[in-house]
């Protein structure tokens, strides 16, 4: 075997954490991190543990194609929510980019 790591993903209702597609193809290990723009007077939202990815998103991540990953996530999000108002598109796209940057910085790379 060539050092390939296989991840066993249980069958069920799991969805890609990036684009919400099914089925999950791969889980990327990730250190926990706070999502800074979600701070309320009480707490931050936190990303805890690994992130699940469909085959397409996993390929984008493995290929280092971060802008394409964020664009795909935004398109799928907008479609799933019946569209996004034009004035909300840019700030929402930026949030996807920032979230994926945090993921990239905290991802535990396979050796």
Image (cartoon, rainbow, N blue to C red):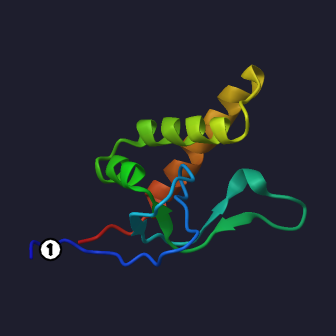
* Looking at the image, residue 51 lies above or below residue 49: above
User: Residue 26 sits in which quadrant?
Assistant: bottom left
User: Residue 107 sits in which quadrant?
Assistant: bottom left
Q: Nearer the viewer, residue 32 or 73?
A: 73
Q: Residue furthest front?
A: 12
The structure residue drawn at horizontal position 25% and vertical position 74%, both measured from the top left corner, is 5
Q: Nearer the viewer, residue 13 or 46?
A: 13
Q: Position of residue 68 (x, y in %)?
A: 42, 36
The structure residue drawn at horizontal position 33% and vertical position 67%, both measured from the top left corner, is 109
Q: Position of residue 55 (x, y in %)?
A: 37, 55
Q: Nearer the viewer, residue 86 or 56?
A: 56
* Looking at the image, residue 20 lies above or below residue 92: below
- Which residue in the structure is indicated by mark 1? 3
Mark 1 Cα-neighbour bin, 10 Å: few <14, some 14–19, many ≥20: few
- Relative placement, left or right, of 44 versus 2 is right
Q: Residue furthest left?
A: 1
The structure residue drawn at horizontal position 73% and vertical position 64%, both measured from the top left corner, is 45
């Amino acid at each position: 075997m060539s050092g390939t790591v296989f991840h066993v993903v249980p069958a069920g209702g799991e969805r890609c954490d990036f684009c919400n597609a099914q089925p999950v193809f791969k889980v990327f290990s990730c250190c926990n991190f706070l999502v800074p723009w979600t701070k309320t007077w009480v707490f931050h939202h936190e990303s805890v543990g690994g992130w699940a990815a469909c085959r397409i998103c996993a390929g984008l991540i493995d290929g280092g194609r971060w802008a394409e990953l964020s664009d795909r996530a935004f398109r799928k999000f907008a479609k799933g929510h019946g569209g996004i108002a034009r004035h909300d598109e840019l700030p929402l796209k930026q949030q996807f980019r920032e979230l994926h940057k945090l993921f990239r910085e905290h991802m535990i790379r396979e050796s």
